[in-house]
Amino acid sequence: MKSKNLSERILRLIKSKGFNNIELDPVLETKYILQRSGENFRKYLFSYHNSDGKELCLRPDLTISSILKYAKSNKNSKEKVFYTGNAFRKSYSKKNVVINQIGIEIFSSKNENNDDKEIIDTSLKILRSSGFKKARIRIGNFELFKLLIKKLPIVSRWKSRLIKFYWNEKYFSELLKRLESNLDIDPFVVSADHKIYLKMKKDNSNKIVAGRSYKEILARYENKLQNPRLLKTGKYSAKVIKEFLKIKTTLKDAPKNLNKFFKKYNLNIYVGKEFFPVSNLNQKNYKFEFSTSNGRGKEIEYYNSFNFSIDVKLKNKVKTYVAGGRYNDLTSKNFGLKKIPAVGAAVDLGIYE
C-alpha cells in the first residue's frame, strides 16, 4: 500500500512538471537489446520466437522501450514523457527479477544543458516527495573519459576498444591488463609486418596492388606497427586511465580537481561547469559528489555524457533510488535509426520490497 500511495504521489509531481504519460509495449525485438549490450546479455532475457520467426523478449529496460516508441513515431519535436511499469530480467543469484519503475524522459532536446538540469531537478523533487531527508547524489560524465582517451598516445583501435567497453568493468579491466603488458600483439606478426613494411618502402611507390596504391598500403602498415608493444606507451596510458577512474570529489571542487589531474599529465583538456548540470548544490542534507566511475558495472548502460545516481539509506542498507543521464547516441549507433538527443531518469520502486 505504501508503494502504491508513493507511486501516485510521484506521478502527480511528474505531471505537474509537464510530462505526459505514454504506454509502453511489454515486449520488444531482442536485437535491440543485443545490439546495445552484446550477445552475452541474452542470458538475462526472457525471449521467444513469434509465428513469423522474429525473436522477441520481455522488456528488460524501460528506457529502450520508450525511445524506440518515440523513434518509430517519426516525430521531431521535443517531448517530455513519463511511464510506469515492470522490466524483466533473469537472475542467477536470486529469483528472477521484476523491476518496478517510474521513468521520465525528454526527447529531441533543443537545449541539452537545460533539459539535463530539468531531469536532475525533477529527480531531486521526487526524492523529497518520497520522504528522504538525506541522500548522496553522484554525478559522472562519460564525455570526460572520451576526451582523456583521445589525448593518450595509443592507436585508434585501442581508443575505440576502451571507449566501447568503458561501462563493462570486468572486461575493461582485462583490456587494461593487455594494454599495460602488451599481450594483444603476437611479436612474430609484428616482426613480419615490419619486414614487409621496410621492403615496400624500398620498392616503387607508384605501384598499385589489389586496387590500392603503395602509399595507402604503407600508411596501413604504419598504423598497424604503432602498437603499445613497440611504442611502450601502453603501460603509461593504463596508469593514467586507472588514476583517472579513481577520482572522487565534491561536485563543487570537481572542475578544479579534474583540471589539476589533466595538467599533471600535460593533457590539453579544460573542464568547466557545463559538464555538471546541477542548478543548486546548497540543498540541506543532500551530499553532491562527482565520480569518474559513476554508473560503471551495470548490466545496461547507454549514457554518452552526463549521468547520475541518487543513493538513499533504507533499512540500514544503501540503495540506488533514482538513476539517469543523457543518451544521444542510443538510437543511431545501436539501432540504426535516426539520432535522437535524449535524457531521462528512472525511479526504482523496488527498493521498498
Image: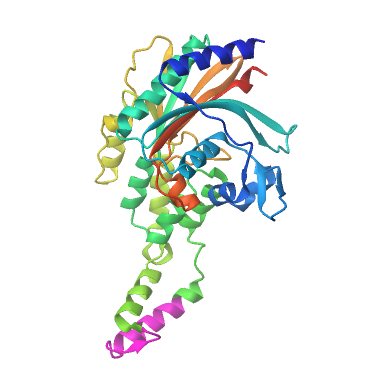
Image quadrant where one finds the C terminus: top right
Q: Nearer the viewer, residue 316 or 123?
A: 123
On the picture, is 241 further left or further right than 253? right
Residue 230: give x, y in percent of width and height.
39, 67
Along the line of sight, the residue nearer the viewer: 62 or 141: 62
Query: Image point 73% across, 38% down: which residue?
Result: 92
Q: Is residue 259 magenta?
A: no
Q: Is residue 49 above or below residue 59?
A: below
> 131 above or below 296?
above
Which residue corresponds to the image point at 70% horizontal and 42% vertical from the top-left?
Answer: 46
In the displayed structure image, the side of residue 241 where residue 55 appears, left or right: right
Where does residue 141 sit, x and y in percent of width and height? 39, 36
Q: Position of residue 232 (x, y in %)?
A: 38, 61
- Residue 340: quarter of image: top left
Magenta-drawn stretch contains 201: yes
- Where is residue 105? Give x, y as percent: 45, 30
In this orientation, which residue lies closer to the viewer: 226 or 64? Answer: 64
The picture quadrant where one finds residue 7 is top right
Q: Is residue 215 above or below residue 248?
A: below
The residue positioned 33% from the left and 46% from the top of the image is 147
What range is drawn magenta here? 191-211
Left or right of 133 on screen, residue 268:
left
Question: Would you say 316 lies left or right of 72 here?
Answer: right
Please, which colouring scheme is shown? rainbow
